[in-house]
Amino acid sequence: MDRYADLKEKLIAIAKENDSIKSVVAIGSSVRDYSKADEYSDIDLIIATTEPDNILYSDRLLSQLGDIKISFVEHTLGGGLERRILFDGSLDADFIIFTPEQFLSAVTDGVANEVMNRGYLVLYDDMDITPLLEKHIVPSVRTVSMSEAEFLNLVNDFWFHTVWASKKILRGEIWVAKMCIDAYLKNHLLAVMEYNRYLSEKEDVWHCGRFLEKWAGEKNTSALKNCFAHYDKFDMIKALFNTAELFSENARLISESCGYKYPDKAQEYATRLLKEYLAKP
């Protein structure tokens, strides 16, 4: 059953009665084939309107869709803004708000392809956007690329910050060290896992770790269990060493697969300092 059927029907009715709304397009899990919507899914909707503030900052229109419990606005693709709302019944709706000009530009410039290439459904069109979508939105999965220069910079950045994090631990800056280990370094780890799995298995690696448990492989997902730390000095030391080990495994496989040079001296020096500064668990 479509949990959002009533919300969509109400939104289409509002659009038909409101000249400012020029198009409504559904994207995300509600319209894609891979990892389809389930009971926990939200609904993602692009709305092109000549009066964006009436949707972003006023409840006048969107309150007609349901009882708004939580709402906030954040930046999104193409220079637009997104209003995220949790309606009563735990109905989670994300409204990407564009002016018609912004939406046209996002489609023709390729920016919209990033969020629409896995599927979309036009619910309302009063700006003749449908032919442009058919022309410019190319169904595809995410591809990953990394030049040798980008690879070397990423790897050196990672090893530099392993040493940086270890110094923060020694200084007692536990919050800063933890954010480096479990946020900054994890983003670098994610980048090499993505590229390694894309190169070796042609996996659809999505973005920002989405569905990582499906594409990263059992070896990576198993190792990740020991890569995150409690807010505790000794647990963080363990997580730092485990993160470094998993990063090295994936990065070296990329180096071998692409024929890229690997900065061995950087890793050797950073590893030596880690062992000097922190006793390896």
Image (cartoon, grey):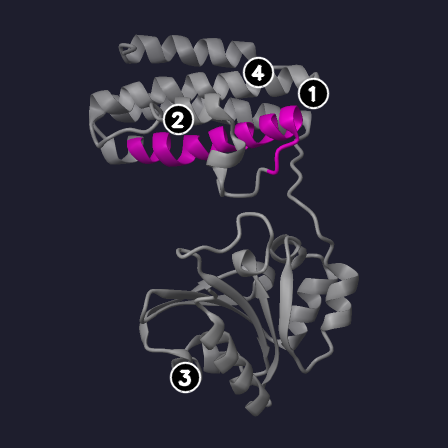
Residue 26: image location, x then y, percent: 57, 66
What residue would you read off at disc 3?
64
In this picture, is 268 found above or below 22? above
Q: Amino acid at mark 4?
A: Arg
* Left or right placement of residue 278 versus residue 52 in this view: left
Sequence-first disc among 4 and 2:
2
Sequence-first disc among 3 and 4:
3
Q: Secondary structure at mark 4?
A: helix
Q: Secondary structure at mark 1?
A: helix
What residue would you read off at disc 4?
252
Q: Amino acid at mark 3?
A: Gln
Separation of marks 3 and 2 at Cα, in angstroms: 44 Å
* Left or right placement of residue 110 versus residue 252 in this view: right
Q: Is-magenta flag for residue 185?
A: yes
Q: Secondary structure at mark 2?
A: helix
Instruction: Give, as a single range, the part of the protein colored magenta.
Output: 178-204
Q: Amino acid at mark 2?
A: Leu
Mark 3 neighbour class, 10 Å CA radius: few under 14, some 14 to 19, many 20 or more? few
In the image, 57 versus 28, the foreground residue is 28
Mark 1 neighbour class, 10 Å CA radius: few under 14, some 14 to 19, many 20 or more? some
